[in-house]
Image (tube, rainbow, N blue to C red):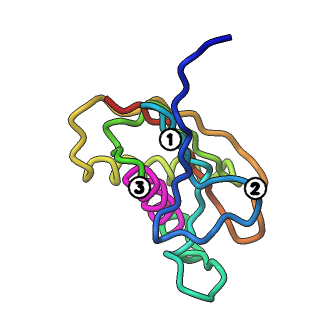
């Protein structure tokens, strides 16, 4: 079988620590960029374990979105390139508050394209984490 291949590149922004298992924070192949599930950890500090942005849904959601954006930017993408966002919440009672935070965040991002499609699901996350977000972007 003869086919043309494009290298797959791992993306790890300076704000992120090395992943704790065999995965990448993001990968890019051709014009496709997949951001792995990000949580609300503050930017990495040398020699320190990751720490959550704070206990509130607002703090964690804003930091999680910043972490997704950092991976997108590491791969040469931005929010306008994002086709799909998946939001993982630990509590169904957080949906309305998360939507308010999410809408306000994207109102400030200066999007020039329609917003991404989005799915929200409810999951279990490690203790203290309230939200996780991943994204799929198509460049060009």
Q: Earlier in the sequence, mark 3 or mark 2?
A: 2
Residue under the image location 41 percent in, 48 percent down: 75
| SS at badge 3 | helix
As drawn, 139 above or below 45? above
Report the magenta residues as a range: 60-74
Of pointers 3 and 1, the one earlier in the residue sequence? 1
Q: Tell me residue 94's x, y (percent).
A: 60, 53
Q: Which residue is mark 2?
A: 22
Q: Is residue 117 left or right of residue 76?
A: right
Classify residue 87 by image quadrant. top right
Give the dominant element type of the magenta stretch: helix, strand or loop.
helix
| C-alpha gap between disc 3 and disc 1 | 10 Å
Residue 85 location (% of width, % of height) = 51, 38
Tell me the number on the disc at residue 128: none
Label 1: how many residues lie within 10 Å, few (<14), some (14-19) or many (20+)? many
Give residue 62's position: percent from left, percent from top. 44, 62
Which numbered circle lies on residue 28? 1
Q: Is residue 129 above or below residue 77?
A: below
């Amino acid at each position: 079988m003869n086919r043309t291949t494009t290298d797959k590149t791992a993306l790890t922004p300076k704000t992120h620590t090395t992943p704790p298992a065999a995965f990448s924070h993001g990968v890019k192949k051709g014009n496709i960029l997949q951001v792995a599930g990000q949580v609300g950890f503050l930017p990495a500090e040398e020699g320190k374990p990751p720490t959550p942005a704070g206990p509130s849904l607002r703090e964690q959601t804003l930091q999680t979105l910043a972490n997704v954006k950092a991976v997108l930017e590491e791969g040469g993408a931005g929010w306008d390139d994002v086709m799909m966002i998946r939001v993982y919440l630990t509590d169904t009672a957080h949906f309305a508050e998360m939507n308010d935070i999410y809408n306000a965040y994207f109102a400030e991002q200066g999007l020039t394209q329609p917003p991404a499609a989005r799915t929200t699901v409810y999951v279990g996350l490690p203790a203290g984490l309230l939200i996780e977000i991943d994204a799929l972007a198509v460049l060009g």
